[in-house]
Amino acid sequence: MRRGTITFFVINLVIIAFLFNAFSTLISLLFEDGSADAIHRAEIPAPGSDLLENRPQMIPKIIHQTYINETIPVQWKGGQQSCIDLHDDYEYMLWTDAKSREFIATEYPWFIETFDNYPFPIQRADAIRYFILAHYGGTYMDLDDGCNRRLDPLLSYPAWVRFTVPTGISNDAMGSVPQHPFFLRVVESLQSYNRNWGMPYITVMYSTGPLFLSVVWKEYISSMRSPAERVRVLMPDEYKGHSWSFFNVVKGNSWHGKDAQTIFWMGKHWMLLTVSGFLLAGVVGTCLWWTWSVWVMKVGKPHVGARKHGFLRLMSPKEKYELADRMA
Ligand SMILES: *[C@@H]1O[C@H](CO)[C@@H](O)[C@H](O)[C@H]1NC(C)=O
């Protein structure tokens, strides 16, 4: 192989190794199916059944939801009310923007600067749910998650998150005891993930959103210690779509307009986006290779000062012919 080609491959290898190292957790997420911690269907009694309901309940009976203010849009009122009605013995906490800010300023002043400076409101909506779970414990759910049955069976785990297909977890429904090590780690990670990735959607998703949570989760489960530190995983069928599922999701308009809708869409399809990203990188790499090859061809021609380029001297006419042949 010619020296230029070798240089090209070495540079590429270094770049690939760097990317691989930087995104190794992301890559290992591709192969994480959540099965090791899945809440098995057989662990969950039928809705209304007393069976197994006498298991100790660890997660406090609190439902947390977030919205800009107290005026809940009409399309979500039904879902919100279904949760309140089914859980009349639970405390219900609605975290408005004003309440959220006050809570952070009072309880976690070290975070208020980051919180205030998030460029997108949805980042605050993401961050606050991790803090309130770490602080009060309870069950958080998005406003478009209506309740299909009581949450009691999910209270018997120290913490749970919701698995998304094909991999990763979402932050739209989750539960925890106060001070659970996973959610402590999540809130402690927020500042170091607060980076601008150029594109709003990626910035939101990787700084506070589902991708951020998935990466922290993947790192957390790779180094887990005791049963109390385990984070159980609610699988898609138990999340929605069946008579025994916990939630029924109301497709509604999003709260911050079209931008947020796109973010939500991307949050739900981040795996597709990640794969597309790698494909794009592959295409760019191929184009670079092609450009490089064409350049080698050009300067390889006689009378173009080829002799200045040491490696081209090593190219015999036969090799040049072969290269031209390959390029054709
Ligand atoms: C709540 O926020 C919505 C959306 O920004 C706004 O239209 C509405 O007027 C607000 N309600 C109150 C009571 O401030």
Image (tube, rainbow, N blue to C red):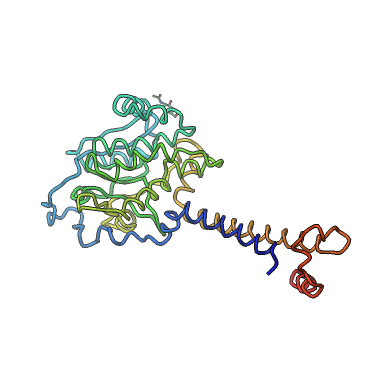
- Residue drawn 82% across and 60% down? 306
Residue 288 x %, y % = 68, 57
Residue 41 placement, left or right of 52 = right
Residue 83 placement, left or right of 4 = left
Q: Quadrant of the C terminus?
A: bottom right
User: As drawn, which residue projects farthest toward the left?
Assistant: 54
Residue 112 x %, y % = 38, 27
Nearer-the-camera pick, 265 or 16: 16
Nearer-the-camera pick, 245 or 135: 135
Q: Quadrant of ligand 1?
A: top left
Residue 303 x %, y % = 89, 61
Q: Is residue 62 above or below residue 222?
A: above
Tell how many labels: 0
Residue 281 placement, left or right of 24 = right
Residue 305 x %, y % = 85, 58
- Residue drawn 44% across and 55% down? 24
Nearer-the-camera pick, 326 or 84: 326
- Residue drawn 15% across and 47% down? 57
Q: Is residue 100 above or below residue 249?
A: above
Q: Quadrant of the N terminus?
A: bottom right
Q: Is residue 39 above or below residue 137?
A: below
